[in-house]
Amino acid sequence: MTFRVGKLQLYLQHRQALVDFATPITGCRDRAEDVVQDAWLRFADAAAATDQPRAYLYRIVRNLALDGLRRQQMESRHQTPDGTPWLEPSPLPEPEQTLDLQQRMAHLVGVLDTLPPDVRRALELYRFSGLTLEQVAAELNVSVATAHRHVRRALVALAQHLSSTE
């Protein structure tokens, strides 16, 4: 028991100096405090009696500080340079941009409304439902060439409207 009390007195006597010793290694006084606390736990649990307990305590602090520094460097190497951008929320568009987009979409829907029903349906199936031209042709009960013409006609109408509004 007296051996452990002697360790505690040594630790308490040199605690501030140990923190000062670990701070330049860790680069942060708070981390240095944590290292010194961990060092005390290791030092107190060490069963072997050393003839230079102060030097042993400093060695524990130094080794723990260097281990923490290495771990920190390794972790920073494996992180993306900008942190984790996929965790950050997407920026919201300005209200003017949202209004402009809504107006453009309304105009495009108006263009789609002017198309014949089978042409519009062909475009919807091909672009929005992700069907192939063969599947569109089967759905509309037309040839593949006709399904292609319908889709192309709808896309040309939309493209002409977009180029005239810009």
Image (cartoon, rainbow, N blue to C red):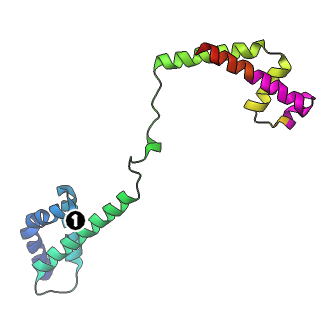
> Can you say which quadrant of the picture contains the N terminus?
bottom left
Q: Which residue is mark 1?
A: 35
- Residue at 36%, 63% in the rendered image: 74
71 left or right of 138 in image = left
- Residue at 15%, 75% in the rendered image: 57
Image coordinates of residue 100 in percent, x first then y, are 54, 16
Q: Nearer the viewer, residue 121 or 162?
A: 162
Q: Classify residue 137 by image quadrant.
A: top right
104 left or right of 65 in image = right
Q: Classify residue 53 by image quadrant.
A: bottom left
Image coordinates of residue 52 in percent, x first then y, are 10, 84
15 left or right of 112 in image = left
Compared with 115, 27 (above or below) is below
Q: Classify residue 154 by image quadrant.
A: top right
Compared with 16, 79 (above or below) is above
Helix, strand or loop for disc 1: helix
Does residue 18 appear in this view?
A: yes
> Can you say which quadrant of the picture contains the C terminus?
top right
Q: Is residue 55 magenta?
A: no
Secondary structure character of the magenta stretch overall: helix
Q: Mark 1: which amino acid?
A: Val
Q: Nearer the viewer, residue 51 or 124?
A: 124
Q: Which residues are magenta?
A: 134-155
